[in-house]
Structure formats: C-alpha cells, structure tokens
Image (cartoon, coloured by chain):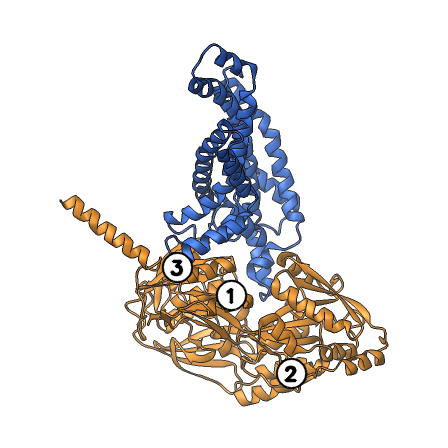
Chain colours: A orange, B blue
Amino acid sequence: MMVRLRRLTCVALCSLALASGVALAQDTVRIAQSLAQNILSPAEATGLPDATVIRTMFEGLVGFTDGVLVPELASDWSANDDATAFTFTLRSGVTFHDGTPFDAQAVKDYYEWVMDPNSRGARGRSLLSSMQRVEVLAPDQVRIHLSQPNGAFIYLLATSNARIVSPAAIAAFGEELSKNPVGTGPFRFVSWDEGQRIVVERNPDYWGAPAQVERLEFLVVTNAATRVAMLQSGEVHFIESLPPQLAPTVAGTPGLEVLSTPANFLRILQFNTTKEPFGDVRVRQALNHAIDKDVLVEVVFGGNATVMTSPIPATAFGHAEQPAYAYDPERARALLADAGYANGFEVKVLTFTGDEYRTAGQVLQQMFAEVGVRLVLDQQERGALVEQIFKPVDENPTQAALVGASASTGDADLALTVSFARASFPPAANNWSFYQNDRVEELILAGRQTGDPAERAAIYAEAQAIIWQDAPWVFLYSPNTIAGRSLAVVGVENAPDNTIDARRAAFR
Amino acid sequence: MTAYVAKRLVQAVPTLLGVVVLVFFFVRALPGDPARLYVGTDADLATVEAARRQFGLDRSLPEQFVFYVRGLAEGNLGRSFRARMPASQVIARHFRATLVLASIAVSVATVLGVALGVAAALRRGSLVDLGITSASILGISTPSFFLGILLIYLFAVEWRVLPVAGSVSPRGLVLPAATLAAAGLGTIARFARSSLLETLGNDYIRTAYAKGLASGRVIGKHAIRNALIPVVTIIGLQFGFLLSGTVIVETVFNFHGLGWLLIQSIESRDYPVIQGLLLVFALQFVLINLLIDMLYAAIDPRISYA
C-alpha cells in the first residue's frame, strides 16, 4: 500500500512537472548568458559574463544602478578640491558572506592587495592605478589618496573590477579565490559548474533590502536560437544577447517580452589616420556625410539602436550632443574632390564575423559606392582581428575597421582616453585610429584635475567637439542591449554596460 | 592476441607523437593572442603581460615545446588558460558528457539500424523495403541542425515535454541523442541491408538452403554473422566521430561536450585544451580501429591475429 501510494504521488508530481513545462520551482530565477564566465574575483575578472554574476555577490564603495552612480558600501563620500583624495563614510553592521566584518580596515586591506604588483588583481590594479594609499580615519571612515588628480576616480570605483572581496577570503583561498567568491552582496555563492552554470542564493544577512528570490542560476547558452527556444519552453526566465532578427519571435510569443535598452556601446568605422587617404580630414568628413545613418540603424537593428551624436555614448557622464553630419552624397563627393579623390578610391575594411557586422558592412558598401568609394569587407574571426588591430603603428596593416567602442566606466574620461589619447595607441589601448590632437590631450588631463561635475562636463564637451570635427571615425550608432524576458519575472534588467542586473529579481 | 594488441599500440606511438608536434605548432601558428583574448580588448598592456606570464607564453617557442613534452611524459596536459584547472580535468568532464551521449546515440542507431536493415533485405523490393530505404535516406540527408531545431520546436516549445538544454538533466539527453541517432541509424540500416543482400547471394548460402536448413538458421547462423563485418566498421567509425564531439548538435542543444569545448577553446586560443583535445581524438580513433579489428576476429572465426 505504501509503495503504491508513493508511486501515485510520484506520478502526480511528475505529470505536474510536465504540465508546467520545465519551470518547476518558483524560487529560482534562471538566466541564460551568451558567453561562459571566466573569473569570479572582481579585480581579476575580464568579461561581461563575469561582471553580471559578480554584481549579485559583490559590492563596491559606490556602484551603478540603472546607469546612475549610487552609494553601495559607502553611505556618503566627498572629494577634496583638486580631486586627489576621496573620503568615504562606510555603512555600519555590514558583514561579508564569511562573517568577516566590513569596515575601514577591510577596505584598506583589500585595496592594498589589489595594488600589490604580485597579486592576481591586475585588472583592478590598472583601472585604479592612480590610487596611492588607503588611510583608515575611523572604523567607519576611510580616505583614498591618489598619486595624481583624478576627478573621474569615483566612476572607476563604481566599476565591476573595483568591487570588494573579503580580505579573509583572500588569505584563505589564495590562488583559488576566483572559485570561492566572498563578498557582501544580496546573494552569496553556492556552486559553479565551470562553463555551464553558476548558482547563487539569497544572503540572509544582507544589510539592505533582502533579495526576493531564493536562488539565481546563470546558465551558459552560446547559441542564440537555443536561448530563444529555452525562453519559449520556460527553462529560463531571461536571455541576453537577443539578435534583432529574433526579437519579433520573442515579442510574438505569449508570456514573453523584449527589453531593448540603450547601452554604453558604439559601432564605428574607424580610419587609420596614418594611412592615405585617411590622413586628410576632408576625406573622413566626406565619408561621414556619405552614410544615411537612420537607414543603417533600421536595416541592421530594426530600430533598436540610436544614431551617434558624439564620440562617446549618450549614456556616459559628460556626453555632449554635436551637430549631425547630415546625409549628403553631393557634399561628400565635393569634399572628396577637394581632397583630390574625385574618382574615389578603394578601402579594405576589417570587421568581425557575425550578422550585425556583415549587414552593417554591406550597407556601408552600398552607400560608399554612391560617392565613388569601393569598400571591400574583410571579415575576420575575433582572435585574428584583435591580433591585427592591436599591432603598433608601423606594423599595423589596417586601413579602416568596422568595430565597437565603449565607455565601460560610464564616464567620458575613460571613453575619451582609450580611444583618442596618444598614450592609447596600439598595442597599449584602443586608439586604433592613431588619432592625435594636442588640445584633446590637454583637455583629457584637465578633466582629471577637478572633481566638480559641471567643470568636467564643460571640458569634455570641448574635447568632443574637436574630435567630432576631426572625424577619425565615421560615427555610426549605439546599439541597444536587447534581451528576452518571461512575464513571470520582474527586476532582471539590462544594465547600460551590457551586463544583466539581476539583484532585484522577483516573481510577479 | 595480447602480442598483437601490444604491437598495434606500439605502432600507434609515432602517429600520436606526430599529432603532438603538429598540433603544438599549428595552434601557435593561428593568428590571435591568448593573453589578449583572455583579458579583453579594454585591458592595458601590463594586464596582458601578466596573463602571458601566467600562461607561460613569455618563454621562447622551443622552451614552451620542451615544457609541454616533458609535461606529457608525466601525463600532464598543462593548465587550461580559460578554466584555470588542469586541461585533463576540463577534457575529462566534457568527455564524460560526450561519451554518454555518443553511447546512447550509437546503441539506439545500431539496434534499430541493424533490425531495419535486415528487415529491408529480407523483404527486398517490397513496400517495407521501400519504406525503410526512404526513411534511411531521409535520416542521412536531413542536416542535424534542422532535425535538432525541429525536435526542439515540437517537444520543448510546442508540447513542453522535454527540455531544450541537453546538459542540465538526464531528460535533456533525449533530443540530442535522437538527433544524432537519426543520421547514424540511416547509414547503418543502409549498410546492413546491402551487406546482407550481398551475403545472401553467396554460394554457401545456397548450399545451406540446399541441404535443407531452415531459413531462420541460414540467416541467423550463416548470413548475418558474415554480413555484420562491414556494419561493425561503420558503427565503429560513427562512434569515433560522435566521440570527437558533434559541434553542431552540441551547439543547438547547448550540450557541453567535447565539440562545444573545442569551439570554445579555439575561440579563446586555449592552447593546452586544444592540444589535449586533438590528442584525445587521435587516440580515440587508434583505439576504436583496434577494437573494430578485434571484433572482426570475434565475429568471423577465419580472421585471427594470433
């Protein structure tokens, strides 16, 4: 009798499970990421998939929520006038997941570990390189001294790489720190099936509003069509990197919705200004006039993107809108003729494989053809492209490249520095145009000398105007981050840095 | 027999050594810097250099090679750049997944394929034969990504009885295994059918019938055993291919086996894992070929390796 009863229960439960698809427990939100996570130690982590998971377990002194700089572990902060020292008041009663108290000493110990050239925190170290020393003023007060003024420093502290790890965990786990994440965040680590799945659970001792779901699961699903099928079948509640051409499928499925969110990313055609004919500003401006960017955005993204209005993303602090390069093939031809290219020329454009880049490349090809410029698209696998584009100036064969740029800190300083400063010539960073302008160099430095937002904004506005005029790129568009979400779930959102913010996940 | 196996294994050593040397230099000839890909395009040079040192790529090529070969001699494939654990551990985990999937797919394909092939051969020219032959050709010629997507759409999205993702639960194995079995089943059925027909045309079969043996005994004892030899070869080769990971099916079903791992490792230029995987693939084929030869002897008493 007992046996039969048990069997019956099992049958009942199993059919229940079948009836409700595969989404069983209502306490776990499942999220499909497009790439595998590599590292869960914030100062070492490299990619977007890492940052998505790290955000649920770790916090910084400050952070971003919905693209806005907000206090996290510090309740308050201030900078001195020349932006060389930042003072933070810390929240009290905060503990790490391992029970270690979070206080000024923990901040000091952790950042000293990051700055130690022998530690594994190379990413955090390079990001926070202006940090000189950390001073404990009181158990709940800490001051960070910089070696040189840096008004953008607070934005650097808000990035994923600056999130704080329990110093006790560093001592305990050493080289294995990445596999044993211990932070202060609303979720704590449960398990990591490498390349496959990461599970985190609600942190019962969280200092702030507690998480509203028991667990989050991050699954690695590299194929976009498979992600969509898993969302449709109810196996996951949220999928990232929804290709624009699959967005209508998701939008047309009952119970699902598409989230399309502006992000800190840009798509650009960058010219190698050391190669003819791109040394001539008239040629570069001409090609900006040769592109109908509204059509481009419609064709490539079905409207899920915005035309660029400045050399930095509109979501970044300091963005200043510039007058558009109107679509004007006549004017483009005239400028080319002025520059001595009345009969046009041929340009080989390096770009990634993948639908977006191919389609965008083909649109550019057609529009360039109208002004006599023959574009040859050279699609390369990512590893090969990265190797070519990072070659130093005298070895770099690239004429032009259709690639991405970003403002990963959400601030103009880094966005301008990595793309337009002389110090960022490859292989050091991403100034793949080998663009240089003395005034821009001065302005980037000046922007760091002050912590005053209004002053900084004015400085960056001038820099953007100069770069916009100089046109080292054809300024194309800023693609939205597109995701699919089940209507059963709220609070899992696209963050402007192209990661997912799942901290407020909840079932409806 | 033991001597024969030992000899075959010794003969495989130069092949494997060749693979070791070729693959080592081949992965390094690919454009793309593992350190840069690991730390990302927005990392500074110091970070790239740190990763390069960590991976041992700051040493000269001959040094790296000696280091690698010395490791191999100790059974050490090196550490995965991406997963930060011994490459052998990474490969072993994905190998288990692929082994389970390939075994299920090959078993299903073998049992059904041989049964259908024999049925078709025995009713040659009938509607049954036509049906089985057409179905086999359909199975062989349907691209696996298409069949996979079709199965996903029906069973996971429309009817919601099975999950899309292959790796998470045992139920997830059903759809990818069915997809893989479909193609193998067709091939095996075709081979079984033609091989059995060919055997049935032999003189000794006619003799067996002539001396009055029952049809069941003729086919069961004389024909099928002989007809199985080319079929076993095909099954072995199929198993070998499936064991090397099936990139497309693994991608469609998000099944994290060896094929998936190979793609991931190539994209991130994870040299130790790529090297290890290719070595494993080569070894698998050596062993499977050996196993097939052993099976020949077991099936056909005239074949002997003594």
Q: Chain of mark 3?
A: A
Q: Residues within 10 Å of mark 2 (few under 14, many from 20)?
A: many
Give amino acid for label 2: Gln
Give amino acid for label 3: Glu
Q: Which mark is residue A144?
A: none
Q: Return the residue nearer the eye: B60 or A455.
A: A455
| Camera-nearest label, 3 or 1 | 3
Q: Secondary structure at mark 1?
A: loop
Specify which label sits upstream in the sequence, 3 or 2: 3
On screen, residue A67 versus residue B17, left or right, reads left
| Camera-nearest label, 2 or 1 | 1
Q: Chain of mark 1?
A: A
Q: Is residue A190 above or below residue B78?
A: below
Give amino acid for label 1: Ser
| Camera-nearest label, 3 or 2 | 3
The outermost residue toward the front is: B126
Instruction: Say which quadrant the C terminus of chain A sits in.
Output: bottom left
On screen, residue A368 versus residue B120, left or right, reads right
What residue would you read off at disc 2?
A464
Q: Return the residue nearer the eye: B150 or A313.
A: B150
What residue would you read off at disc 1?
A241
